[in-house]
Image (spheres, grey):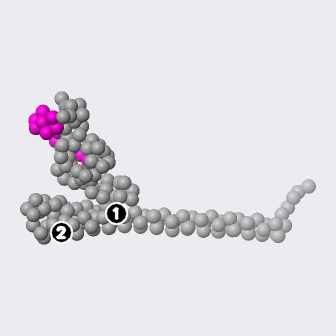
Amino acid sequence: MTTTKTNTEENLEKEVDYKALYIQTLADYQNLQRRSLEEKRAIAKQASNDMLLKVLHIYHSAKAGLKYNEKGAFLLYNAFVKFLNDNDIGIINTDFFADKTDNKFSEDWAVAISIKSPEEDNLFPEMKDEELDNRIYSVVEDGFYNIKTGKVISYAKVIVYKVN
């Protein structure tokens, strides 16, 4: 006994195949839209980070101008710090290290550009050399991080105490 499909059964099978193909195509299109949107967001975010890196040297110039107690530099510095705060950018500086790391060096936040022996200046006679080991002596250049994500934009440059 041979089974043959009727026209109606064949048409139903074709219709099911077309529906499945339509659903798959629609899903592929929606995935493409989602990926395109994610890529556009990533590009925009990278562009804003690139712009911010180019602007950060203004911060360092304004901070250097503060050493000369010039009113204009002070106003520029405060305006720039406000700009950073408004854009969720935190400053990795001496106060940051005192609050977050108890002045201990951390590669997560800084790059050590030099080391210093505690015996060289004896600024902390009450502290043992072992307590000073791996502590930050000074911040040469502030760093910056995204407050929301915690991601470092540029690392602070520091001098670190090292006990031989």
Q: Secondary structure at mark 1?
A: loop
Q: Residue furthest top?
A: 164
Instruction: State the separation of the CA atoms marked 1 and 2.
Output: 18 Å
Residue corresponding to mark 1: 88
Would you call the spot at circle 1 few (<14 residues within 10 Å), some (14-19), or many (20 or more)?
some
Segment colored magenta = 110-125
Q: Is residue 93 above or below residue 106?
A: below
User: Quarter holding the C terminus?
Assistant: top left
| In front of the other: 118 or 147 | 118
Q: Position of residue 131 (x, y in %)?
A: 24, 34
Q: Secondary structure at mark 2?
A: helix
| In front of the other: 151 or 148 | 148
Residue 36 sits inside the magenta stretch: no
Residue corresponding to mark 2: 76
Q: Position of residue 96 (x, y in %)?
A: 28, 52
Within the image, what quadrant is residue 11 found in?
A: bottom right
Name which residue type carries label 2.
Leu
Q: Residue at x 57, y 64 (%)?
A: 28
Within the image, what quadrant is residue 65 found in?
A: bottom left
Q: Residue at x 84, y 67 (%)?
A: 6
